[in-house]
Each structure stands twice: as C-alpha cells, then as structure tokens.
Image: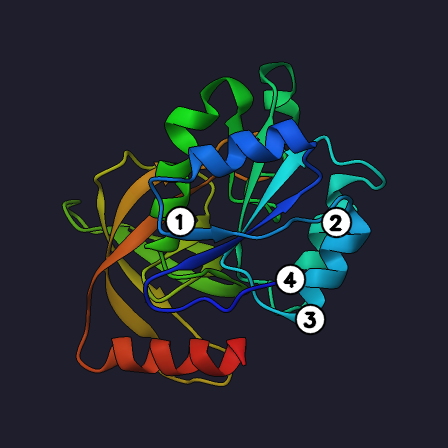
Amino acid sequence: MQMDSSADWYTVLPVGFEPAGLERLRRALTPLQAVVTGGADDWSEAVELASIGHYDALAVAYPLRGAPMSTFLAALRKPDCPCRTSSVVLVAHERYRSEAEMYAGRGANRVVTWEEVELRLAEVLDRLFSTAPRLPLTIPSRIQVVADRPVKRVDCRTVNISTTGMLLDIPHTFRPGTVLAFELLLPGSHEPIRGRARVVRRTAEPSEPFSGVGVVFAAFDESNEGRLVSYLDRFAS
C-alpha cells in the first residue's frame, strides 16, 4: 500500500525486484528520509499503482520483465498519470549499463548499477528530490553567451523545463559553467521570459537523441520568474 509523502519523508516505489534485491535497495536507501513501499512485481502492477497515487520516485530493476522499458516509461509519463513528474532511477548490472542509459532523458532520470548501489543510490535520489520536476514542454528559445563580444544570438528549442532549469536542443554545445542570456516564448504569450542561466551539463549522446545542454536558472528579468512559475503550475495541473 502506498503511503502519503510529507514534508519530511519521500516515497519510493520499487519495481521488478527479487526479494534479495529489494532488501539491498532498502539498505541502500537507509541514509535517505524515504519510505520504501512494498513494491510492484512487474510493469503492469507498477503502472496500476502509479495511476492511482503519487510516488516521489520509482526505482526500477533493469531489464524490466513483461514489457519493453519504453512502453513502461511512456505509460508512466502520460499527462494524466500522478507519477508523470516522479523521479525514475533504473538499477542495472554493469553489463546492462549502456543499454539502460539509452532511457536517461527519455522517461528515466538516472542509471545506477548494482555494483555501486550502496554507494550512490541514496545520493542520486537526494539530488533528484532537491531539483524541481521538469515538464516536457517544447518551445522556441534564444540564447547568447554573456561573455561574447560581439554578442552572437543562437536560436534553439527548450525540450523540458522546470522552475530551476531547462534542457536545450541546440546545434552546438557549451562548456559547463558558461553563463548564457536566454529568451523563452511561452505559448499564448507575446512577451518572452528573459534571464540568465548557467550550463551544468552536456547531453549524453546516444542516450539523449540530440545535441544540447542542461542549464540552471541564475537570474530573471523583472517579474519574469513569477510568469514562468505561474505558467508551469497551470501546465502541470
């Protein structure tokens, strides 16, 4: 049975784990303030549980029995699913790592191997919990490197976005740490959202099917942050 999350505790739904693996998962998450629920044996049970209540995260054994991972993730990320913004971590043996990483950014958030699960799983989930959920929203964007003189503007598109950052599909890449000025034109709006953001990562091809960068917002012009938060709240509801 699912337990409601509170301000102090997160809920984690295990999917597809054998009893021994489930016990390892529980031990690995001991440092985290999380309630590990009873779990789902297969993908269909997991989809059923996810469709009737929200979990902060799903830890999914890879490969998943009974259905392709893409089918499971597509069902989980449907607009009407309560878990469509939940964090998803795939737990795989090292020999499946590269295969599992193909789903990072395509419904899953991270991959952790069994060989490192006790060392990294709690840390990975803690970082995901501290990041605002990103929503799949494709909108036209424009960026420029603040330090460039003369200024060169680059047209691109936002692939997903949250109140803390966004993922950009762009023809070329930038080094982590690069500060960018950005403009976002939200659907139905005539005035762009403007501000500055810092590059924190490059996309990992081929696991992400485009070249681009992930950025965190550093500053907004005037009331632009409030406009973005208000729009994302409406989009998520």
Mark found first going from the N terminus, 1 or 2: 2
Mark found first going from the N terminus, 4 or 2: 4
Mark found first going from the N terminus, 1 or 3: 3
Is 101 on the left-hand or right-hand side of 110?
right
Marks 4 and 2, how far apart at CA: 20 Å
State which mark lies toward you, 4 or 2: 4
Amino acid beneath label 4: Met
10 Å crowding of disc 3: few (<14), some (14-19), many (20+)? few
Amino acid beneath label 3: Ile
Return the residue at label 4: 1
State which mark lies toward you, 4 or 1: 4
The answer to whether the residue labelled 3 contacts the one labelled 2, judged by CB atoms less than 8 Å apart, is no
- Residue reaching furthest right? 66
10 Å crowding of disc 4: few (<14), some (14-19), many (20+)? few
Residue drawn where x is 35% and y is 67% of the image = 163
Residue 183 visible in the displayed image: yes
Residue 158 visible in the displayed image: no
Is 103 on the left-hand or right-hand side of 168?
right
Amino acid beneath label 1: Leu
Q: What is the number of the mark on residue 72? A: 2
Secondary structure state at the residue bearing disc 4: loop
Return the residue at label 1: 128
